[in-house]
Image (cartoon, grey):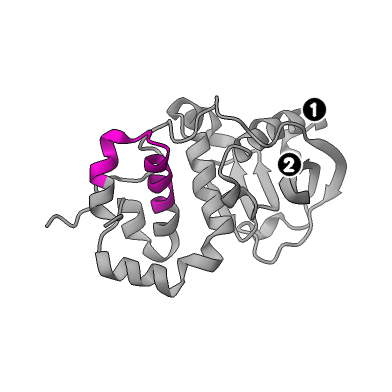
Amino acid sequence: ADTNPPFDNTVYLEPDVITADDPTAFRTIIFEGEVTAEDYSDNCDEEFAGEEIYLYKEGKSRGQTVEFYIDAGFQSERAAQDIAQIYAPILGQVPHTLRRGVDVMIIRAENENWCAATGQIEIEHGNYREELEDGALEEAMMHETVHATLDDDHASAAEWLDAQERDGLFVSEYAMSLPDDEDLAETFTAYYGVLRSNWLAYCVIITATVFC
């Protein structure tokens, strides 16, 4: 049997797992002021703590809120708000199971990487146009929310590790290259695509590799 992953990654596979037309839980953000970023010990960008930022808050279901830390490199409160209004609705489009664990979103003006740690997501806005053209903004957000919300409880869980060992397969090259870090997030995106019936053309391939 062919054990090679069928895809390079699942974020860029199809742009319609979540679309810009899907409903969002987040519409309105509130400016809280220019403040100093708090020290999050598990922040994926340790240098961010102590920097001056624009702080916004967005209410979410069940009484929780998300704080948006907008890099002062955006240079004005208006520009920072425009950036927050791009990403807040996208976060609101991912399944509640994922977004409920996100407490902080950090948005940088420069560079092109996204990363996540427990409870928080960091976005570097430099590749926004490319992600927009690829239709991958929503899928990238979902991928990072898996890291922020599910990794701690599930990526090292005995049941997940047993499933990895038993099937011996990965849905993507990226998952196979970093099985401890990326397999769960890559698999969830494929699972959600099949769940929503958007990926009918890929369903047989995906179910043959990871959903046995």
Front-most of residues 13 and 212: 212
Give the distance between the C-alpha atoms of the residues marked 2 and 1, in whole angstroms.
11 Å
Name the element at disc 1.
Answer: helix
Query: Where is residue 138 drawn, in percent x and y?
Result: 52, 36
User: In the image, is residue 120 above or below residue 7?
Assistant: below
Magenta stretch: includes residue 87: no
Q: Name the residue under label 1.
A: 78
Residue 64 in sight: no
Residue shown at 62%/40% (left/top)? Answer: 91
Question: For the residue carrying disc 2, how many other residues have a C-alpha within 10 Å: few (<14), some (14-19), or many (20+)?
Answer: many
Front-most of residues 82 and 211: 211
User: In which quadrant of the rendered image does the N terminus lie?
Assistant: bottom left
Q: Mark 2 points at which residue?
A: 70
Give amino acid for label 1.
Arg
Answer left or right for 127 relative to 11. right
Query: Where is residue 51 drawn, in percent x and y?
Result: 77, 52
Magenta stretch: includes residue 193: yes
Answer left or right for 44 relative to 12. right
User: In the image, is residue 199 above or below residue 7?
Assistant: above
Quarter assignment of residue 23: top right
Name the element at disc 2.
Answer: strand
Q: What segment is highlighted magenta in the picture?
A: 186-205
Front-most of residues 103 and 211: 211
Answer left or right for 67 relative to 188. right
Question: For the residue carrying disc 1, how many other residues have a C-alpha within 10 Å: few (<14), some (14-19), or many (20+)?
Answer: few
Q: Residue furthest left?
A: 1
